[in-house]
Image (cartoon, rainbow, N blue to C red):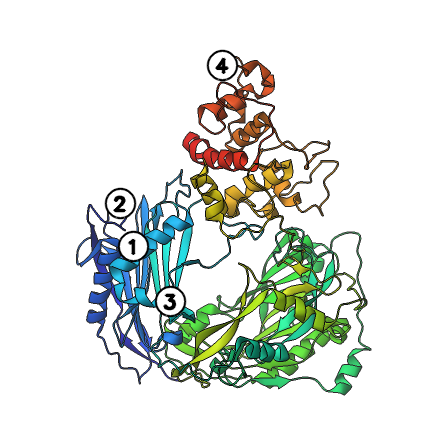
Amino acid sequence: MKYKKALSGLLVAGMVFSNASAFAADEMMVKESKAIGGSQIISEESQPNLSQEEAEGIFKSHIKDFYNINIDEGKEGMHISIHFREEFHMNGATWQLNLHHNDQDKYLNIYAMIKDETKELLSIRKHEGSHRQTGQITKFTFEEAENIALKFLKKYKTDALSQLSSKAQQQPMYYYYGLDRGPGLHPREYYVFFEREEEGISFMNEGITIGVNSGTGEVVSYEYRWSNEELPAKNDVITPEAAQKSFVEALDFNLQYVPIYNKGGYYGEPIEEVKLVYSPNFADGHLVDATDGKMINPYQNQMAETKTIDVSDAEKKSFEAMTKEKVEREKEINKEEAVKIAKEVLGKFYEDFKIQSTNYYSNRGHNSQKNWQIEFTTGEDLYNRGNISINAMTEEVMDINNYNWARREMMMMNQEDFTAVLEWEDAYKEAIEIIKEIYPDRLKDVETEQRYAESYFYMNDVKMPNPEYHFSFNRKENDIAFLQNNILVSFDRTTGQLQSLNYRWDDIELPKPEGLMSKEEAVDLYLEQTDMELAYVVIPERKIEETESETVLVYRSTPKRDFMYYSIDAKNGKFLDYRGKEIKEEKQQLDSVGDLLKGHWAERELTIMHDSGIIDLQNYSLKESVPKKEIIRMIIKSIGYYMDSRDVELELKFTDISKEDPYYEEIKLAVQQGIIENEAVAFKGEDPVTREELAVMLVKMAKLDKLAKVEEIYTLPVQDVDCITPDYLGYTALAYGFDVIKGDGEKYNPKAVVTLEQVAVAIYRNFKNLLYIIR
């Protein structure tokens, strides 16, 4: 496969800001910056419809219209690169722009993409800010973002409005209560998605997404996904009942082992318990053809032909006799012992390697292991660098990594032929031999069957076959897969060398498949939460080189509510979340949060707290008291993903809190942040919290503990000031003075129990009025 250099894609430009714009940022000072030369590589057959100058002009026009930024070539500069791609996913040939500017105070990045054939803008995104920026908070609700997005569409995409759904969706939906911590009250981007519709029928994965900054209310991104294929006729469409029947007949459920995570569910988290679950298997597709009732997999057509390989039955039988002596040490191996093991292992795969450095980690990888990591090089090329990790207690090889990305870049720059020296089938045999050598006792307990389909990726804007082979040998017991335990092996097919080896195998007993519900029962439970709905979907051509496609009318399974759960506990039929935890029964069903909060004295703050995924309106009513543990969770969630318990090395001293407690991580973070004290007493997480106790937590959250403890300077203009606990007076005074927790008329009522609405509003106002203003 040959490539040639064709288009120079880098230019130096300047920008001028207008003083007034509905969607633009504040004025920015631009300093001259030095351009970096570069070139673009495209295939010989490619002939763009647009010239680079024409594409550049279109980009300039959109950036001016959307952000009121003028790119004036030849003046004070920024870096701009313009690239042509002859094939970019489903968009065909496109032009893409990347703009970067960075000075001492501010930074600006803009990415945009237009379709080469039609000149249509497919996407544009701006990210900017100040290096010294503080005090930002989410100020806009999703409903307000929706109105901003609609106003934007009416100005820039009027012709599409009649073909879009009237009600926008928040996409992607990962800010719901109970999921991973998001950015909390820090500004983020609301993705307002208007789905494409035709006579009430939706188009899957098509429409317009507008990104609105939740802190400024500015439109910062636009994405247009729209196919132009002729629509199929709607006559002779089968009924939803017939579609449901086809769906059920094709639906199968796999029995799997899944871990129960007590923390965030990250890869390195220790696995202490495993469940058996049913998960749906859509091997024949998840869509029903609305004309003939056959199943459709829209993604299968994009794949190359799939190959399958496995060892023989005789080989599998021989694996049962393979063993390995288990090492159990009382003390970690030393550096010399670790290097000796590393040399013995590396010598099996690489010639002329040299050990460069050795590091010890007391808490690394899954299960917080004690590991030695040894860096090495191969040959004379300094870019041929790798590392090997050895478990210091078991002497097991945990991973080997040997990538040479610099060599890949050089292949492209030097227009080298891409030649595979290792075929996939031979790589598979090599992988089996490696496992025999390193983990012989595991071969009998892994799934040895592997599948392969050719895949492609872009490097320096050049489409090329993936130069790597990847194999995943997943743990299997009782003929049931446990995907979180595996041996991963990859090879560089251009060199034939081992590229990576990763090993995760938890020393945990997997439950036997006894006393389980039937697959039929699991199917019934799954179907209870779904409806069948007509939709259009684009089916690409089967050959990956071609871009022709067609639009098909299908039935899709949609959730009756906001969420669809895919994992079902095989013993009790309960739906499980991504951590293997049972979905909590909701005390109340909410058809509209807007209706619930409309007219409330704190409608705006409560709506933002809900949209940010901080308050739980399904399980707590607004005027209900909230237990201490839930308040701690709300405070931590408001701070967002900037806090991570994995980086906090401390043990909680509370006598009534165990590591299995679902609130353990949030309580741990609250201690680390100084919000609560880590004491050898009962935490009493179920107890309610008083107004003065909440004031203490929030002032400590703002890091003003020392200021609050200053004596004889605080008071409150309320009748019951003497009822405030003396040690809490400074905290309550600060909370009162900064409008975080105000009094109730002429009284403060320090001993009154706080409700959900009071806690939510206090956290928001603390974030806005105290936390960052003081800092």
Q: Residues within 10 Å of mark 4 (few under 14, many from 20)?
A: few
Q: Residues within 10 Å of mark 3 (few under 14, many from 20)?
A: many
Q: CA distance from mark 1 to mark 2?
A: 21 Å
Mark found first going from the N terminus, 4 or 1: 1
Disc 3 and disc 2 in contact, CB within 8 angstroms: no
Q: Nearer the viewer, residue 291 or 195?
A: 291
Q: Relative to 255, does residue 577 appear above or below in the rendering?
A: above
Q: Residues within 10 Å of mark 2 (few under 14, many from 20)?
A: few
Q: Which residue is mark 4?
A: 713
Q: Nearer the viewer, residue 695 or 12?
A: 695
Picture coordinates of residue 741, whole percent (x, y): 50, 28
Q: Which residue is mark 2?
A: 26
Type of amino acid at the residue the image marks with label 3? Gly
Viewer can see residue 89: yes
Q: Which residue is mark 1?
A: 151
Which numbered disc covers residue 355?
A: none
Q: Which residue is mark 3?
A: 207
Mark found first going from the N terminus, 1 or 3: 1
Disc 4 and disc 3 in contact, CB within 8 angstroms: no
Type of amino acid at the residue the image marks with label 2? Asp
Q: Nearer the viewer, residue 117 or 572?
A: 572
Q: Residue at x 76, y 82 (%)?
A: 316
- Helix, strand or loop at label 1? It is helix
Picture coordinates of residue 461, whole percent (x, y): 36, 72
Type of amino acid at the residue the image marks with label 4? Ile
Q: CA distance from mark 3 to mark 2?
A: 30 Å
